Image: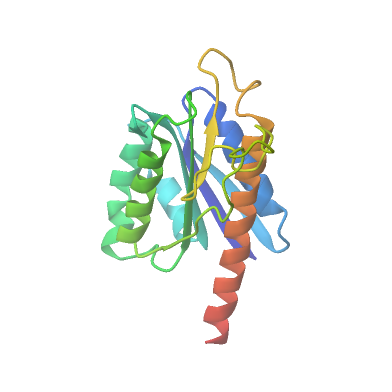
Amino acid sequence: MTRVAIVYHSGYGHTHEQAKAVAAGAASVPGIEPELLRIENAGQDFAPVLAKLEKADAIIFGSPTYMGSASAPFKAFMEASSKPWFEQKWRNKMAAGFTNSGSQSGDKESTLMQFVTLAAQHGMVWVSLGLPPGNNSTKGSVEDFNRLGISIGAGAQSPVDAGPDVGPSASDKKTAEHLGRRVAEAAKQWNSALIDA
């Protein structure tokens, strides 16, 4: 069984909906065991989360984008990950990321780049979204996969005056599912290659 951990923070529930979609995508791949690990606040004890991540084959990072950056609780988790970093316990695990903001851009790529850097410091293997941009021609629509045109990871947009029952959109959730599936498939292939080596 290949384990895919989705570790994330959600301030208002929108990123939680995105995380569930990522998990559903991973679960659609046979032999994958996804697990949602929610960061609640910056002051929590991260040891139980870090222990579970040590056993994962892939880790997908998720956070809302606040002021062009990952949320404070997720940043606290990132700093707490220095403990496994000292022993490179996440080395060669698959890594990916997703984020949500109130506006279509919201500087989401800044948050995703923080995740890329975190993964690189841990010696992880980054998995991009692997989708061309959607909604970028006269034949496109907001229903397209990757409607926000982000390559690094999965982006979503949720109206700031609506709850998680309204946003993220169906297409953003489908994009998140794609990311979860892609990471799960990559982790299975990587594990198989390591076993055969």
Residue reaching furthest top?
A: 161
* Position above or below: 102 against 48: above
Q: Is residue 104 left or right of residue 91?
A: right
**Location of residue 66 (image quadrant):** top left
Point 48% across, 53% down: residue: 96
Q: How is the image coloured?
A: rainbow
Point 69% across, 38% down: residue: 139
Counting every numbered tag in the picture gives 0
Residue reaching furthest front?
A: 138
Q: Quadrant of the N terminus?
A: bottom right
The residue lying toward the viewer, choosing from 52 and 76, is: 76
Is residue 111 at all visible to an observer of this figure?
yes
Q: Position of residue 164 (x, y in %)?
A: 60, 23
Q: Position of residue 88 (x, y in %)?
A: 32, 65
Q: Is residue 88 left or right of residue 21?
A: left
Q: Position of residue 30 (x, y in %)?
A: 73, 62
Point 56% across, 73% down: residue: 191
Q: Position of residue 79 (x, y in %)?
A: 28, 45
* Position above or below: 83 against 193: above
* Position above or below: 9 against 165: below
Point 61% across, 36% down: residue: 172
Is residue 56 at all visible to an observer of this figure?
no
